[in-house]
Image (tube, rainbow, N blue to C red):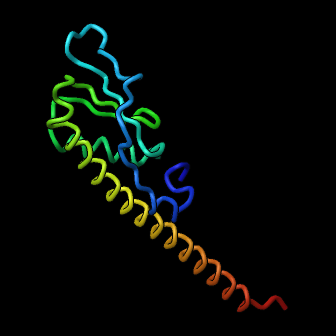
């Protein structure tokens, strides 16, 4: 389960937030006069599954602007005038939706793991029971 669920309780408590714009990293896209790579600092470094869920949630909006996670940053590819009016509110909503989707993912993974453990315990019990019934005289 790698970084997906190193700690189930920590995963269910994960709450990624957009903290602030990083003006030092924000820059114009090479070869473009209008498109920027706008960097937002996140409250943490999202795990792999969170990043995947974010990508899916962003795609649901069918926007032409790209948004992606780059380590502890959310990077938006857009024109600067689009950020405050339309895109930041959309980003905040997508982050909120992603947090909820990730919490559900963690719950599902924890339930699947518990089910695997229960199946294994039952298999071990069945083997033990069968072994005790054997007679080697």
Which of the image's four quarters has the C terminus?
bottom right
Relative image position of residue 61 (x, y in whole percent): 16, 42
Relative image position of residue 33 (x, y in whole percent): 21, 10
In the image: residue 38, left or right of residue 47: left
Which residue is nearer to you in this view: 80 or 112? 80
Relative image position of residue 38 (x, y in whole percent): 31, 27
Q: Is residue 26 above or below residue 113?
A: above
Q: Is residue 25 above or below residue 114?
A: above
Which residue is nearer to you in this view: 30 or 5? 30
Residue 63: quarter of image: top left
The residue most toward the right is 137
Q: Is residue 42 above or below residue 1?
A: above
Q: Residue at x 25, y 42 (%)?
A: 91
- The count of marks equals 0
Relative image position of residue 104 (x, y in whole percent): 36, 63
Q: Residue at x 20, y 43 (%)?
A: 90
In the image: residue 20, left or right of residue 44: left
The residue most toward the top is 31
């Amino acid at each position: 389960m790698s970084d997906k669920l190193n700690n189930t309780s920590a995963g269910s408590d994960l709450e990624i937030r957009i903290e602030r714009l990083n003006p030092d990293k924000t820059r114009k896209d090479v070869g473009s006069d209008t498109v920027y790579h706008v960097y937002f600092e996140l409250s943490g470094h999202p795990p792999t599954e969170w990043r995947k869920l974010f990508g899916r949630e962003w795609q649901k909006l069918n926007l032409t602007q790209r948004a992606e996670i780059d380590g502890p940053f959310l990077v938006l590819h857009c024109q600067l005038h689009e950020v405050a009016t339309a895109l930041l509110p959309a980003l905040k909503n997508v982050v909120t939706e992603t947090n909820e989707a990730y919490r559900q993912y963690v719950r599902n993974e924890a339930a699947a793991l518990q089910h695997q453990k229960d199946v294994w315990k039952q298999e071990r019990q069945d083997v033990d029971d069968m072994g005790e019934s054997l007679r080697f005289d």
